Amino acid sequence: MILSLDTSVLVAAFTVESHSDRARSVLDREAAWGISDWAAAEFTAAIRAKSRRGEALSGSIRELDEGLDRLVRSLAADLPVLASDHRQARAMVLRRDGLHPPDALHLAIAKRIGACLVTLDQVQAEAGRQEGLEVLLP
């Protein structure tokens, strides 16, 4: 089964956070990985927001972006986002009170490809389970 990495895992793995060790341990596993184009876009925005807030980064923004690109290439793990994913995400938001659209998009992509979503977000994890997804919350 493909393990689809949510942005929360990627950001924690590449920066300094309380969950960084947990996120890095997930990436140390042998698995078939997936990183959606959406997760990559969110990652890029998140590390820039952390930098603006003065939060610790484990490298420069450019190095972090290049690190993510290397990870995606090495895992052959890029997952495109389809128009149907956006429609599915909207339907999930309508069904699940409190589910944010960006999180729903991760769920929709994972559901479409039959992946297990790996996330550090407990609300997203619960919504994923309610949607019938396998979820790994490290």
Image (tube, helix red, strand yellow):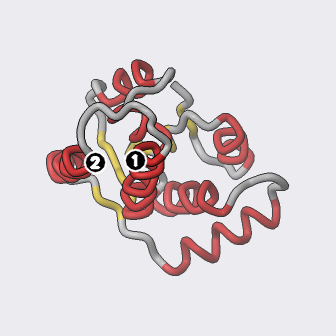
Q: Which one is in front, 102 or 126?
A: 102
Give percent across and percent down for residue 74. 15, 46
Name the residue located 57 percent from the left edge and 38 percent from the top edge: 135
69 relative position to 3: left or right: left
Q: Looking at the picture, does residue 43 appear above or below residue 37?
A: above
75 relative position to 11: left or right: left
Q: Which one is in front, 18 or 31?
A: 18
Q: Secondary structure at mark 1?
A: helix
In primary-sequence order, the first of circles 2 and 1 is 1
Give percent across and percent down for residue 63. 19, 45
Q: Quadrant of residue 11?
A: top left
Q: Looking at the picture, does residue 5 appear above or below residue 19?
A: below
The reply to whether callout 2 and callout 1 are in contact (CB within 8 Å) is yes
Residue at label 1? 47
Q: Quadrant of residue 124?
A: top right
| Residue type at numbered disc 1 | Ile
Assess disc 1: are there few (<14), some (14-19) or many (≥20) residues with their C-alpha within 10 Å of its C-alpha.
many
| Residue type at numbered disc 2 | Ile
**CA–CA distance in space, label 2 to label 1:** 7 Å
Q: Looking at the picture, does residue 92 appear above or below residue 49?
A: below
Give percent across and percent down for residue 98. 80, 52
User: Can residue 116 be seen in this snapshot?
Assistant: no
Residue at label 2? 61
Assess disc 2: are there few (<14), some (14-19) or many (≥20) residues with their C-alpha within 10 Å of its C-alpha.
some
Give percent across and percent down for residue 73. 16, 53
Q: Which one is in front, 112 or 11?
A: 11
**Count of labels shown?**
2
Q: Secondary structure at mark 2?
A: helix
User: Can residue 3 be seen in this snapshot?
Assistant: yes
Name the residue located 44 percent from the left edge and 62 percent from the top edge: 38
